[in-house]
């Protein structure tokens, strides 16, 4: 599944590709696309791969990756917060990790159907004929279309008597017979400062377009990470940076090219490019540092780079309270 988030106030589009296989394999690739830089070329493109309770995050353009075990059977924050789950209400059945949640509400429509706290009603006449509504007090109200295989039409999530998020599907796509998914939807968000709620005019809006969906087209072999030449493995908690595959000038040239394409139009960030290249060069020469805070090159430091990598995708944070 490949999604595109409309740019809104930004000049770049955020693009996400989601791949799921079986009950324990999930891959999410996230990047930006702007100007002449495609989403595959953007230097900060990252991939998060979950296989059982093992998580691997890698940045292909920088040839850097992290691998560690999940401490709880729930999704990392950055994956749980993807707009796709909110806009479709879909989650694979019998998956090893819990479905995405919003507060204490499961975003999985099947969970709502089986939850006794939800009441069910059906419109049998008028413009909403054929719609089914599931409601949980003033917390969650879901409208489904019977004609579209009970696909999501609208959902309103509230707290403290205020609508925090409203999801409205505007187009659908048939995936397999009798199964439809929203292919376009708008998500209206309440002001965090307590101003407009999600039902009022002028609410902040995110428009999501699902560009393509393919069913039954993946192989298990797609869910494995093989470090490329020059790849370095890092650990956020141990401040450890280790090159695990020999690199060379070809690897350095590729990384430099990716960075220059992304930052050519922004001279204010050239210092960052120089700093990152110095780190990559150190990795290409086989340098290993246990305490990276003491190694500085090109106006930046290893901790600066190490700290910036997780910020490119929030999925590296967990729900167990560990520091990001």
Image (spheres, grey):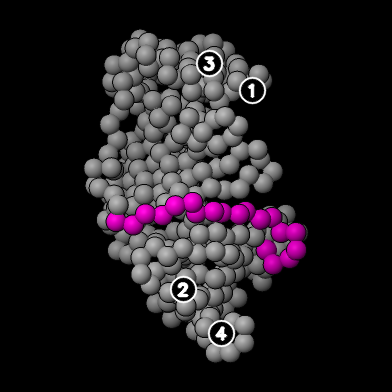
Please indicate whether residue 88 sits to the left or right of residue 289 in the image. Answer: right
- Residue 129: which numbered mark, if any? 4
Whole-percent x, y for residue 201 in the image:
75, 63
Q: Earlier in the sequence, mark 2 or mark 4?
A: 4
Residue drawn 37% across the image and 17% down it: 251
Identify the residue position indicated by label 3 in the image.
Answer: 275
Q: Earlier in the sequence, mark 3 or mark 1?
A: 1
Q: Quadrant of residue 112?
A: bottom left
Give how far apart the Cα atoms at labels 2 and 3 are.
52 Å
Question: Was residue 204 drawn as part of the magenta stretch in this picture?
Answer: yes
Residues at circles 2 and 3 in contact by the CB criterion of under 8 Å: no
Residues at circles 2 and 1 in contact by the CB criterion of under 8 Å: no
Residue drawn 57% across the image and 19% down it: 272
Whole-percent x, y for residue 163 in the image:
65, 67
Whole-percent x, y for residue 29 in the image:
43, 42
Identify the residue position indicated by label 1 in the image.
Answer: 265
Residues at circles 2 and 4 in contact by the CB criterion of under 8 Å: no
Write down the region rendered in magenta.
Answer: 198-216
194 is higher (above) or lower (below) than 271: below
Q: Earlier in the sequence, mark 2 or mark 1?
A: 2
Q: Earlier in the sequence, mark 2 or mark 3?
A: 2
Please state which of the two labelled residues, at mark 2 or mark 3, is closer to the viewer: 2
Identify the residue position indicated by label 2 in the image.
Answer: 148
> Callout 4: helix, strand or loop?
loop
> Callout 3: helix, strand or loop?
helix
């Amino acid at each position: 599944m490949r999604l595109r988030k409309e740019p809104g106030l930004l000049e770049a589009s955020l693009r996400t590709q989601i791949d799921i296989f079986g009950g324990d394999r999930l891959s999410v690739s996230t990047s930006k696309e702007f100007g002449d830089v495609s989403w595959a070329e953007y230097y900060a493109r990252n991939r998060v791969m979950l296989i059982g309770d093992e998580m691997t995050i890698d940045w292909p353009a920088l040839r850097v990756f992290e691998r560690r075990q999940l401490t709880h059977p729930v999704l990392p924050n950055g994956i749980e917060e993807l707009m796709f789950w909110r806009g479709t209400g879909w989650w694979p059945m019998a998956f090893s990790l819990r479905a995405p949640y919003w507060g204490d509400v499961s975003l999985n429509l099947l969970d709502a159907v089986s939850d006794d706290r939800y009441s069910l009603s059906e419109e049998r006449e008028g413009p909403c004929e054929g719609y089914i509504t599931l409601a949980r007090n003033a917390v969650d109200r879901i409208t489904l279309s019977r004609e579209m295989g009970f696909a999501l039409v609208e959902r309103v999530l509230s707290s403290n008597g205020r609508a925090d998020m409203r999801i409205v599907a505007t187009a659908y796509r048939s995936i397999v017979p009798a199964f439809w998914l929203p292919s376009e939807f708008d998500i209206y968000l309440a002001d965090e400062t307590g101003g407009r709620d999600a039902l009022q005019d002028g609410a902040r809006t995110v428009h999501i377009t699902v560009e393509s969906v393919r069913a039954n087209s993946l192989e298990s072999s797609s869910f494995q990470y093989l470090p490329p030449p020059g790849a370095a493995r890092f650990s956020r908690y141990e401040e450890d940076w280790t090159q695990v595959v020999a690199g060379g000038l070809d690897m350095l040239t590729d990384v430099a090219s990716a960075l220059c394409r992304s930052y050519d139009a922004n001279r204010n960030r050239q210092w960052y490019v120089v700093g990152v290249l110095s780190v990559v060069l150190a990795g290409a020469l086989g340098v290993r540092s246990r305490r990276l805070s003491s190694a500085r090159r090109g106006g930046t430091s290893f901790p600066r780079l190490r700290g910036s990598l997780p910020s490119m995708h929030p999925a590296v944070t967990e729900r167990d309270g560990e520091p990001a």
